[in-house]
């Protein structure tokens, strides 16, 4: 206690630097750089927890690659069009095909109706009334080809453009095929093999292709599944082309409809009708006779074509002995059907098929030969009634005119035999089946020749030797 009373009653002296009292901070008492700075209540005394702001990285913009197209063909559309739309699109497709052929790509792997000259359709967009359609190279995935076409359609004009001249196709554009399974050349070889022999199985086709030393025609065993898939697709495409879009199922009604649609007499009548645009093709499929009885489970269809029927007139034109041949092939497919064929012989040792008929198995008989032959002779004698068309370059009409101009053929066409639909058969040949011999004597009025190979058993010997090999 001080001994000076005036010192005790005197107030304390003021501090030179007064400090404002503050609330304790919520960061464990850690001080700031400036302890005298005022702290706002909304920043530290709020109920939200303290969050540290993260520094956002600088966003990098992707470089934009502008695709430059160079026009390679231009045409007018609308009222100023110089050609029909179909003709113009055909010329455009040919121009696109020429650009594709520069790389050696000639056959499409999987073609679609939307393709343009072997190019695959890509993105389509419209802007300000102008439609842009992008077409990519079909080898873009396999060989990494970046070539593209663009079809521009406006109201008054159209353009076919190519993506930059430096990206144009050349011989080495598709040199490196990076496909893990079948290569492009192998797929083309498979398609060609299926078209050549569509009835062979995938295993037999692969075995036959292994005989070639070319690596493009040799398929490894590990790719057998891919090989089978390509064979299936090639057969389906071939069947769709032959049937012209007609769909067949397992019903007798659909088969009856198909036979009536391709009946030979109906096709000839449509060809001769000037108001009908139909024209008979040289190798188009036709039905010259059929019998479908659902109740008795009977199926018979006699098939031919214009080219096959004209073999009879070629045999007459040759002046050689008109020999009619026939035979039956059993176990045609998994179903219980056989294949019966009629043909004529020509020099040198050639057998020209006239018709092929599907019959139920184990039904080869004199009656079967008689019914099928009657359908064949009527179909052959109907060929001279086909009227030539106005096109001078028509191949089917030109072949018929050349055959009818021959003296031997013209004499037969004017004879009573042709009017009665009787073929000038002089001799007959088949295996030693008794039904064929009876058919030759009762229907043709001649005796059938004897096949030496079947009579001596050489056929079985040759078959055994071929199986051993």
Image (cartoon, rainbow, N blue to C red):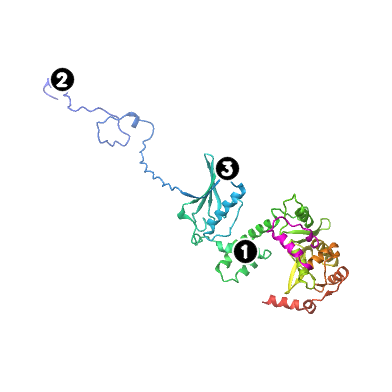
Q: Which of marks 1 and 3 is nearer the N terminus?
A: 3
Is 342 positioned to the left or the right of 228 in the image? right
Alpha carbon of mark 1 to alpha carbon of mark 2: how far? Answer: 123 Å
Q: Is residue 142 magenta?
A: no
Q: Which residue lies furthest to the left in this view?
A: 4
User: Is label 3 in a helix, a strand or a loop?
Assistant: helix
How crowded pointer 1 is (Cα within 10 Å; few <14, some 14-19, many 20+) is rated as: few
Estimate the x, y position of residue 469 in percent, counting from the top left.
66, 77
Estimate the x, y position of residue 315 in percent, counting from the top left.
77, 69
**Magenta-drawn segment:** 380-407
In-front residue for pair 338/156: 156
Q: Which of the numbered marks, if any, corresponds to residue 9?
A: 2
Rendered residue at 63%/58% (across/down): 233
Compared with residue 405, is residue 59 higher up or lower down, i.e. above or below? Answer: above
Instruction: Nearest to the eye among marks 1 and 3: give it.
Output: 3
Estimate the x, y position of residue 217 in percent, counting from the top left.
58, 67
Is 284 positioned to the left or the right of 193 in the image? right
In-front residue for pair 153/156: 156
Q: Which of marks 3 and 2 is nearer the N terminus?
A: 2
Q: Residue furthest bottom?
A: 456
In-front residue for pair 401/175: 401
Observer able to see residue 270: yes
Instruction: Nearest to the eye among marks 1 and 2: give it.
Output: 1
Rendered residue at 31%/29% (across/down): 40
Reading the image, the residue beneath label 3 is 80
Estimate the x, y position of residue 38 in percent, counting from the top left.
28, 29
**Marks 2 and 3: in contact by CB < 8 Å?**
no
**Marks 3 and 1: in contact by CB < 8 Å?**
no
Compared with residue 152, is residue 168 higher up or lower down, i.e. above or below? Answer: below
Reading the image, the residue beneath label 1 is 192
Alpha carbon of mark 3 to alpha carbon of mark 2: how far? Answer: 117 Å
């Amino acid at each position: 206690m001080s001994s000076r009373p005036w010192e005790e009653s005197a107030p304390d002296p003021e501090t030179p630097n007064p400090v404002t009292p503050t609330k304790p901070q919520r960061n464990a008492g850690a001080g700031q750089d400036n302890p005298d700075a005022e702290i706002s209540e909304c920043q530290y005394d709020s109920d939200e927890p303290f969050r540290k702001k993260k520094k956002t990285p600088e966003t990098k913009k992707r470089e934009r690659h502008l695709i430059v197209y160079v026009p390679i063909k231009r045409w007018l559309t609308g009222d100023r069009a110089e050609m029909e739309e179909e003709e113009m699109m055909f010329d455009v497709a040919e121009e696109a095909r020429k650009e594709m052929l520069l790389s050696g790509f000639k056959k499409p792997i999987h073609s679609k109706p939307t393709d343009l000259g072997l190019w695959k359709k890509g993105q389509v967009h419209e802007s300000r009334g102008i439609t842009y359609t992008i077409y990519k190279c079909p080898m873009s995935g396999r060989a990494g080809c970046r070539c593209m076409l663009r079809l521009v359609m406006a109201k008054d004009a159209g353009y076919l453009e190519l993506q930059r001249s430096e990206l144009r196709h050349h011989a080495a554009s598709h040199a490196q095929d990076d496909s893990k399974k079948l290569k492009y050349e192998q797929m083309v070889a498979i398609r060609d093999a299926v078209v050549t022999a569509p009835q062979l199985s995938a295993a037999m086709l692969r075995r036959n292709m292994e005989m070639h030393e070319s690596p493009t025609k040799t398929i490894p065993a590990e790719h057998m599944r891919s090989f089978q898939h390509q064979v299936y697709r090639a057969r389906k495409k071939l069947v769709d082309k032959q049937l012209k879009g007609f769909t067949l199922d397992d019903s007798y009604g659909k088969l009856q409809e198909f036979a009536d649609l391709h009946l030979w007499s109906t096709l000839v009548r449509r060809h001769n009708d000037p108001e009908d645009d139909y024209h008979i093709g040289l190798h188009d499929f036709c039905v010259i006779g059929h019998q479908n009885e659902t109740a008795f489970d009977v199926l018979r269809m006699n098939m031919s074509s214009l080219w096959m029927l004209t073999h009879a007139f070629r045999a007459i034109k040759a002046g050689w002995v008109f020999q009619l041949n026939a035979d039956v092939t059993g176990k045609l497919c998994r179903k219980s059907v056989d294949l019966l064929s009629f043909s004529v012989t020509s020099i040198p040792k050639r057998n020209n098929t006239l018709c092929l008929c599907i019959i139920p198995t184990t039904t080869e008989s004199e009656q079967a030969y008689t019914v099928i032959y009657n359908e064949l002779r009527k179909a052959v004698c109907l060929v001279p009634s086909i009227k030539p068309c106005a096109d001078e370059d028509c191949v089917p009409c030109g072949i018929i005119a050349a055959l009818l101009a021959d003296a031997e053929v013209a004499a037969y066409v004017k004879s009573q035999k042709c009017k009665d639909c009787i073929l000038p058969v002089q001799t007959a040949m088949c295996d030693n089946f008794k039904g064929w011999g009876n058919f030759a004597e009762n229907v043709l009025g001649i005796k059938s020749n004897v096949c030496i190979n079947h009579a001596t058993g050489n056929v079985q010997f040759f078959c055994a030797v071929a199986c051993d090999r």
